[in-house]
Image (tube, rainbow, N blue to C red):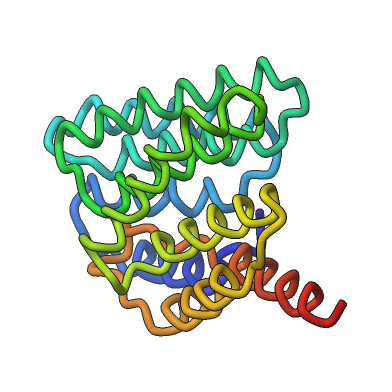
């Protein structure tokens, strides 16, 4: 996780050192930098609590709750116990819902679908059919809200890729969407330094898988 956003972290550090921004922005930038430097479950617990406190102090800001949720998502990837993983993801959805009540924007909608996509993996046999329609709907809605958002496109590609593999169908369309997401990551311009920029490493990993799959 430490290599996810090296350039972004350096930019945040430079901004903080320059002394710019409000106290909220400084707290958020420092916390975001800390999040991307965290690599253990206990550390993610600390980030969940930190972003929760910021959110509770800033009643009209959705970003703290988004990053509180994202901290839980990152932690979930490190958990092997499926029941524990599921509980962590449930809490991530609770935090995200707080952000949605403030501003249900493309990042909130896309992350909601992403969390539920991970939850399918906890119990694919029973959850695939029940959760998939809502997930596709969230990703489709996010892409309509902002066609240039790289995470919305990547998540849709991942969902299509997994679904195609599950049903033994071709992955060409999904892989084309992965390629599109990589382009979007390269050209995406966040509106401010606190906005989400993560996900490109995952897009490149999927792009590699697609190339390896097409050569078989």
> 163 above or below 185?
above
Of the pair 165 and 209, the residue shown nearer to us: 165
Q: Is residue 20 left or right of residue 80?
A: left
Residue 67: x, y in percent?
Answer: 40, 42
Residue 202: x, y in percent?
Answer: 62, 62
- Name the residue located 42 percent from the left edge and 42 percent from the top edge: 135
Image label count: 0
- Name the residue located 72 percent from the left edge and 36 percent from the top edge: 78
- Name the residue located 69 percent from the left edge and 44 percent from the top edge: 39
Q: Residue furthest right?
A: 216
- Name the residue located 18 percent from the left edge and 33 percent from the top edge: 58
Residue 18: x, y in percent?
Answer: 32, 69
Name the quadrant of the C terminus.
bottom right
Name the quadrant of the N terminus.
bottom right
Q: Can you tell which quarter of the image residue 94 is in?
A: top left
> 64 above or below 179?
above
Q: Is residue 70 left or right of residue 139?
A: right
Residue 45: x, y in percent?
Answer: 56, 26
């Amino acid at each position: 996780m430490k290599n996810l956003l090296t350039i972004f972290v350096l930019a945040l550090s430079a901004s903080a050192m320059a002394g710019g921004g409000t106290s909220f922005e400084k707290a958020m930038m420092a916390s975001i930098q800390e999040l991307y430097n965290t690599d253990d479950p206990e550390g993610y617990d600390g980030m969940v609590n930190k972003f929760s406190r910021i959110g509770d102090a800033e009643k009209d800001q959705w970003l703290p709750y988004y990053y509180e949720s994202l901290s839980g998502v990152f932690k979930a990837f490190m958990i092997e116990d499926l029941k524990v993983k599921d509980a962590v993801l449930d809490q991530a959805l609770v935090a995200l819902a707080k952000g949605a009540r403030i501003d249900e924007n493309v990042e909130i909608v896309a992350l909601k679908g992403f969390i539920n996509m991970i939850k399918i993996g906890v119990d694919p046999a029973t959850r695939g059919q029940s959760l998939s329609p809502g997930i596709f709907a969230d990703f489709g809605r996010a892409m309509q809200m902002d066609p240039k958002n790289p995470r919305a496109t990547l998540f849709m590609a991942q969902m299509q890729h997994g679904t195609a593999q599950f049903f033994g169908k071709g992955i060409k369309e999904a892989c084309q969407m992965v390629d599109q997401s990589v382009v979007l990551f390269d050209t995406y311009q966040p509106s401010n330094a606190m906005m989400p920029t993560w996900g490109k490493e995952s897009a490149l990993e999927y792009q590699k898988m697609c190339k390896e799959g097409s050569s078989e």
